[in-house]
Image (cartoon, rainbow, N blue to C red):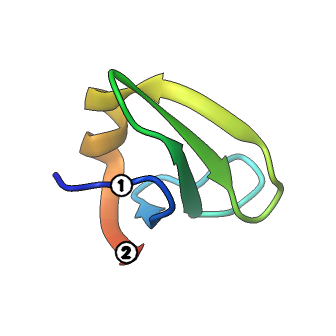
Amino acid sequence: MNVKVGDLVEMKKPHPCGGKVFAVLRVGMDFKIKCEKCGREIMAPRKKIEKNIKKIILD
């Protein structure tokens, strides 16, 4: 999957606040993403994030 820093991605599962759109802040072995609704930042393994991406909204 070709995800770059600055992309907006829609996830399959929503964040607990209800938002499904996240901004990609860091790419590597771990992804750092930021919820666009509440602003919370999350770090998770690359495999888990790539599996849960529904679509890339903004390149």
The answer to whether residue 21 is above or below residue 3 is below
Image coordinates for residue 20, horizontal then vertical, percent: 57, 63
**Residue pictured at 45% horizontal, 65% vertical:** 7
Horizontal arrangement in the rendering, residue 22 relative to residue 46 (left or right): right
Badge 2, how many Cα within 10 Å: few under 14, some, many 20+? few
Residue under pointer 2: 59
Q: Nearer the viewer, residue 30 or 14?
A: 30
Residue under pointer 1: 4
Image quadrant where one finds the C terminus: bottom left
The answer to whether residue 48 is above or below residue 24 is above
Q: Quadrant of residue 46?
A: top left
Query: Which amino acid type is shown beneath numbered disc 2?
Result: Asp
Query: Which amino acid type is shown beneath numbered disc 1?
Result: Lys
**Residue pictured at 78% horizontal, 43% vertical:** 40
Image coordinates for residue 1, horizontal then vertical, percent: 16, 52
Disc 2 + disc 1, Cβ < 8 Å: yes
Residue, far bottom: 58
